[in-house]
Amino acid sequence: MTSAMRNQPLADLPRRILMGPGPSEVHARVLGAMARPTIGHLDPAFVALMDEIKALLRYAFRTENAMTIPISAPGSAGMECCFVNLLEPGDSALVCVNGVFGGRMKENVERCGAKPIVVEDAWGRAVDPQKVEAALRANPGLKAVAFVHAETSTGVRSDAATLCRLARDAGALSIVDTVTGLAGIPVEVDAWEADAVYSGTQKCLSCPPGLSPVTFSARAVDAVRRRKTKVQSWFLDLSLIMAYWGDKDGGARTYHHTAPVNALYGLHEALAMLREEGLEAAWRRHAIMHAALVAGFEAMGLGMRVDAAVRLPQLNAVEVPPGIDEAAIRRQLLSVFNLEIGSGLGAWAGKVWRIGLMGQSATPAYVLACLSAVESALQGDGAKIALGRAQPAARAVLGVS
Ligand SMILES: *Cc1c(COP(=O)(O)O)cnc(C)c1O
């Protein structure tokens, strides 16, 4: 082997504390499941596992939708799957944009040959239902209303129940991005009567990146069946995927693509862990870790960028103190503390850090480690912060004495 061909030994990869916008910490049980022997994707044992994954996803999404499956690609593919299947050239769709991912939804609508009607809200604000209602009144006959439930670029939660109701009242299908929402805050697909909902494995489900759970209501499946044109994506064509995954348990299992067998082992284990903990308990855990993190940062003298009423517990936009080079702090957190946090995006670049408390990363140990590392790095940089206050404030919330 020439030196140019020498590869990096994977054993030397650093072990990180993952507190960015994803991926989140992956539990050893999930990694262990993924290391199980690969079997054929049409093996009866694997088909049985696929049925369990569908049932576990219905639990996580709180839905009875038969069409509830993981797409074999990351969250962005789940997004694309919803748009390419529901929209046809010439359709119009309302898209709510209050951050990066709403902007991507608009891009998806355009690439389907459909017309986006955009309702914009400022970064850091929730989608305003009154604006949506007005836009629906001004634009009758829309095919879909698309919005981001949990905007990871800002850490804002929008009112999914209300937005889905407005879509339904206007005769439109709702398309909901809850990539960051699922398992971190309540997602109630059936109670919301949401039509096409997608998520990802690498946020609050705490799996490695690469899969995208989606769920389609009977209304949405019917809309796919009634299409006049073929779905332009062969890979994401729901009618083909349905023939593989089965639109109910069992099903035809016609070969479409080879499922990522070991990645699905991991998802199965992560969903089993969620079921063991219980959804409500997981939501509660995220809320408590968030309260502790906020108490710590506020005691240190750092502000939260988003109003408490619409904050996501799993994604915290923390204001960078004046005069501090935020990228230098993040570099130090990574190199000295092995801690990854996220930077601000767009208009918020340089102004906030995005700190994730997703899935297995939402624990007292991670909250306290993050507060102490950030305090240490800021102190080293000469920032004017209140020293020694963050730990007691967070510990009080966590009940650690
Ligand atoms: C992460 C994310 C996505 C994209 O998921 P990938 O797995 O990165 O493709 C989409 N929407 C939101 C809100 C996200 O946070």
Image: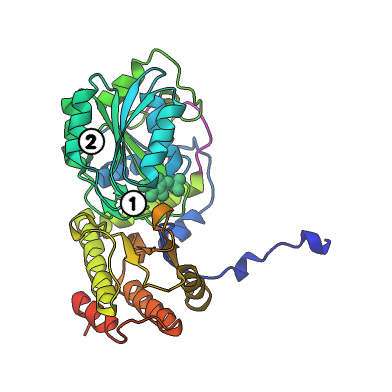
Dividing the picture into quadrants, the one containing residue 63 is: top left
Relative placement, left or right, of 246 versus 132 is right
Q: Earlier in the sequence, mark 2 or mark 1?
A: 2
Residue 306 coordinates in the image, percent (x, y): 26, 59
Give the spatial CA distance, label 2 vs label 1.
16 Å
SS at badge 2: loop
Query: Is the residue marked by circle 2 packed among few (<14), some (14-19), or many (20+) residues within 10 Å?
Result: some
Q: Position of residue 93 (x, y in %)?
A: 32, 27
Residue at the spot x=24%, y=64% of the render? 285
Vertical position of residue 351 compared to residue 138: above or below: below
Q: Inspect the magenta stretch and tell me whether residue 257 lies in it.
A: yes
Residue 33 position (above or below residue 393) = above
Residue at the farthest front position: 323
Stretch in magenta:
251-260
Q: Is residue 347 magenta?
A: no
User: In the rendered image, which residue does mark 2 sit on?
Assistant: 64
* Kind of residue at disc 1: Leu
